[in-house]
C-alpha cells in the first residue's frame, strides 16, 4: 500500500460556501485521514493522508470545490516533517 501525505492550501472564494464540509465528505468517501480548517486570511488549509491514488483524486476534487466555491489557487506540499503524526479519520478543525 503506497501512502501519501499532503499539506494543501486553497485560495479563492472558499469560506462560507461549505468547503470544509465538502472536503470532509470527499475525504471520508476516499478513506483519507487528516483535517481541514479555515485560515484567518480567507484561505482553507488541509492535511490529506491515505493511499497515493486516493490523495491524487482528492486533490482533483479540491481544485473543483463545492458548487458555490471558486478555487483560484491550490498549493500542495509533501508533508514529511511530521510523518509519525497519526490521524483517526478526517476532521474539521476550528
Image (spheres, rainbow, N blue to C red):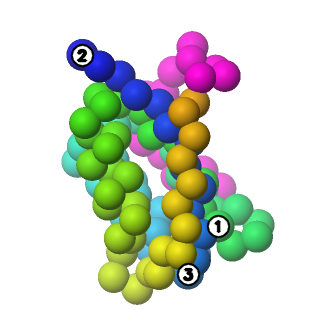
Q: Earlier in the sequence, mark 3 or mark 1?
A: 3
Q: Find the magenta span and give its range.
A: 80-94
What residue lies at 59% left-to-right and 23% top-to-bottom? 80
Q: Which residue is mark 3?
A: 13
Spatial separation of the CA atoms under disc 3 and disc 1? 8 Å
Residue at image position (57%, 54%) is: 75
Where is mark 1, residue-wise?
A: 43
Q: Are marks 2 and 3 in contact (CB under 8 Å)?
A: no
Mark 1 Cα-neighbour bin, 10 Å: few <14, some 14–19, many ≥20: some
What's the residue at 42%, 32% (across, down)? Answer: 49
Front-most of residues 64 and 45: 64
Label 1 residue SS: loop
Which SS class for mark 2?
Answer: loop
Please provide percent x and percent y for residue 76: 54, 47
Is 45 within the magenta?
A: no
**Chief SS of the magenta region:** loop
The relative height of residue 74 versus residue 13 in the rendered view (above or below) is above
Amino acid at each position: 500500500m503506497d501512502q501519501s501525505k499532503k499539506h494543501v492550501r486553497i485560495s479563492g472564494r472558499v469560506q462560507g460556501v461549505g468547503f470544509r464540509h465538502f472536503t470532509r465528505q470527499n475525504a471520508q468517501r476516499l478513506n483519507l485521514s487528516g483535517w481541514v480548517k479555515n485560515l484567518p486570511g480567507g484561505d482553507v488549509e488541509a492535511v490529506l493522508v491515505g493511499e497515493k491514488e486516493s490523495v491524487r483524486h482528492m486533490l482533483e476534487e479540491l481544485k473543483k470545490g463545492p458548487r458555490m466555491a471558486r478555487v483560484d489557487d491550490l498549493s500542495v506540499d509533501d508533508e514529511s516533517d511530521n510523518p509519525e503524526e497519526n490521524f483517526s479519520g478526517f476532521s474539521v478543525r476550528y
